[in-house]
Image: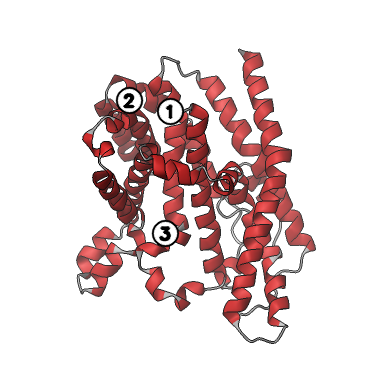
Amino acid sequence: MSKQGKLVYIDSLRGLAACAVVAGHFVGAFGLSKSMPVVENSPLHILYDGFAAVSLFFVISGFVLSTKYLTTDEQVEPVRFIASRLFRILPAYAVVLLLSLVTSLVCALRVQTSPPQTDWVLAFWNDSVSWKSVGSQLLLGAPLRGESNYIPQGWTLQLELILSFLVPVLVLCARQATKWLLVYLVVLIAVFKLPLFLAHFALGVLVAKYAKSFSESGVSKSPLRLALVLLGGLLLYTYRFTLPVYLGALGLGRVAGVLSKDSVIWLATGVGSALILLVVLNSNRLQGILKAPVLAYVGKVSYSIYLSHLVVLLAVVPPIMRKVDGWGFGLPMLNAGAGFVTLILGTILLASVLYYTIEVPFIRLGKWAVGRRG
């Protein structure tokens, strides 16, 4: 399998995670989870589980950023590494932030829809705008209290950028011994209070280190065992909305309370993400599915999908839903269906424009700048 082929199906996996975030925001924007309680608390929640998708993003990042250093003798060059990350993440983010600001000022928001928009989504873009708050968000900071939050998912990008800077050190530890990676991880999280999400990057590094060993093991050569690993990964990946909820329903509130702590949930979804990634790396069938042209394209523009979908959700979807509702069918779910199709198509269109006009040029510029420095 070529390196390029690997990147295609890994990107496709990231694209599916981005689509889950889009779907999750749509469900939350119109309170649709109330109308599908069976799906809400079942493994099917994976279709719109934006929380678990964040874990998968970080695990994939840890894997992609470390794999060439753990499978070759190439040495990490910190300055080049950091520069390439800055060129990859910040330009598209800044453009989408400014696009969101302009859109919030010129488009009619708070359109009456059926089903109605929730207070959760209406709170993102409000009438309170200050350049100080916009400047804070341009630097990947949080908006000022009460101000519009133009890219609410921006908190994950702040973590992605900062924690990815530590990947070279994780690689150096992993090259020495896994135990040193674990010691370093515990010290940073327990002593220096770094976010637990660093463990997700570390899991990605460990997948990169042990992927070859796993592929040579009996597990990867047995379809049944590989399927069991995938099942375990999926159960952990959807953990947030399953096991703690089931235990609570059975009257085991104290146990459910412990298992529903954020730290436990994020660790579970991180391990689940790592297992899913490990299976994909060792399954030709899954790789073939993920390399389908549509999924490959979604994977290619996945970063812009993740960044820009709220522009479509907040400014384009509500008027379309109101238009469909005006046809007189009186079917809220028909309106929601039209809104969801609009969200998917509109987001892919916008993401495509951003990818080719912003992402690609700045990736090339970053490579040029890094290469010139060398």
Q: Real-space Cα distance between discs 1 and 2?
A: 10 Å
Is 8 drawn above or below residue 318 in the view shown?
above
Outermost residue on the top side: it is 374
Task: Give the number of the mark in front: 3 or 2.
Answer: 3
Q: Within 10 angstroms of label 2, few (less than 14), some, or many (20 or more) residues? A: many
Question: In the image, 331: left or right of 264?
Answer: right
Three-letter code for the amino acid on which mark 1 is drawn: Ser
Q: Disc 3 marks which residue?
A: 46
Q: Disc 2 marks which residue?
A: 174
Three-letter code for the amino acid on which mark 2 is drawn: Ala
Say whether disc 1 or disc 2 marks the residue closer to the N-terminus: 1
Q: Which mark is residue 66?
A: 1
Q: Within 10 angstroms of label 3, few (less than 14), some, or many (20 or more) residues? A: many
Instruction: Work out whether residue 143 can be spotted.
Output: yes
The answer to which quarter of the image holds residue 202 is top left
Image coordinates of residue 175 in percent, x first then y, are 33, 21
Say whether disc 3 or disc 2 marks the residue closer to the N-terminus: 3
